Image (tube, rainbow, N blue to C red):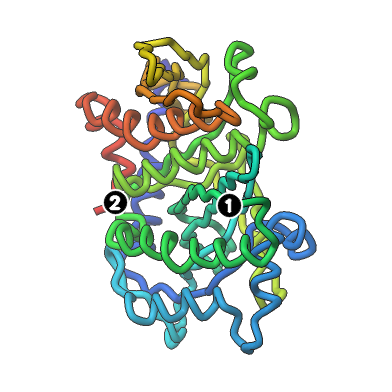
Amino acid sequence: MVKNIGMRKNVKIAFIFTLAAGLLFANQDVKYAGFCFSGAYADISKNYPYTQKMLQDSSSAQSYLDKLFFDYFSANSELGNFTLDIHNQTKATLSLAIALNREEVAFEYYDNETKAIYNLGCTVFIMDFADLTILQSYPINVTYIDLYKGEPDQQTIIQTIKKLYSNYILQKLMSNQKNIYIRSSGSLTIKVANVNFQEEALPFLGSYKTEPEIETYAAIVAQHLTEALAFKMNLTVLPYSRSNLSYKMSLSFSDASIQNFTIPAASYDIDITVKRFLKKLYKETAAERVDLYGVELEMRIYDAEFNQEYWKQTIQNGAAKQTVVGQIIGNEFYKYNEILLLTLSDKIPATLKEDKKLMKGILKKCANY
């Protein structure tokens, strides 16, 4: 009994501390820190080759992306519950930066054509420069498919990447910026802690089915779920950090400066286990074939520090995909991937919202307002 009473006191003290910390965050000025890259500066050309080449080709003193996002936030400085100080006129320690953390171009080859699948991922981070911690993350992910006669050259790819920034990333940012908040007073935090794939799911992951690529795909899955939780459920979400412990994140800015930020432990953690993928024939005629593609995963919400589980559920989702006679499917991974990402962005938020006990007991504590 004495041990339990002590734990209750500790929880109460922790809640009071969290409430006080929340009061420090809300209604503060937030400075604009600019565009940056996730990771070490020396790795930029390896991790983001097309974006790096695009920036190197710029003749302006201000890089293309620095100007793109500076101009955007200059004209759109009102966010969820704060106004961004774009010219850094205040002494605020809180800052907002937009970081590139995924650039991927994959190809599928047909007779005389090449299918290019572009994946671009950025994250809006709210950071505290006083103690160099990440307070919140708002991922923005874009997938774009183009078909070329022959194989596209580097300049064509770079111009497409440029279009993804100027049109698609900015459009998603504009659509969601009113849902970008400084964490509310007393708000707790949640994050995706672990993404796992059972053996039955691995053969469907294409080039991601072996290490270290599987960890890359786990991070993609975590990014998409984090985006859904932040924008569609208005939760205070920390970035995926591959463990339940605190984690260092390096952000490299365009002036070659590097800052290492700590991602603190979250109040609640989420584990996602992708259990299996499914393909089943729905109907077939002389002109077409329709298959059902599905995914089954398990989602768990828990307190890692106290090893207490609050919610666990198996979630299934699927969709029909049509193939016309003569059409060649280069890589079915992208169909399974599409179903999984739709599950993360749509099915999971809908499932969580249906559970009133979970919403009131846990997720409401992580809400921004």
- The disc placed on residue 200 is none
Q: Which label lies toward us, 2 or 1?
A: 1
Q: Earlier in the sequence, mark 2 or mark 1?
A: 1
Q: Position of residue 222 (x, y in %)?
A: 52, 38
Question: Quick check: 139 above or below 35?
Answer: above
Q: Position of residue 317 (x, y in %)?
A: 36, 21
Residue 195 vs residue 176: left or right? right
Residue 120 vs residue 89: left or right? right
Question: Quick check: 206 above or below 119?
Answer: above
What kind of residue is marked 2? Answer: Asn
Rendered residue at 47%/74% (across/down): 69
Which quarter shows the N terminus?
top left
Given residues 307 and 10, the one toward you in this image is 307
How many marks the image carries: the answer is: 2
Give residue 320's quadrant in the image. top left
What kind of residue is marked 1? Answer: Tyr
Q: Is residue 143 visible?
A: yes
Given residues 51 and 314, the one toward you in this image is 51
Q: Is residue 16 visible?
A: no
Given residues 300 and 204, the one toward you in this image is 204
Which quarter shows the C terminus?
bottom left
Question: Quick check: 295 above or below 173?
Answer: above
Rendered residue at 59%/15% (across/down): 198
Q: CA distance from mark 2 to mark 1?
A: 44 Å
Rendered residue at 23%/24% (across/down): 355
SS assignment at label 2: loop
SS assignment at label 1: strand
Q: Position of residue 269 (x, y in %)?
A: 47, 33
Q: Position of residue 314 (x, y in %)?
A: 39, 15
- In the picture of the structure, the residue carrying the numbered disc 2 is 368
The residue at the far right in this view is 42
- The disc placed on residue 148 is 1
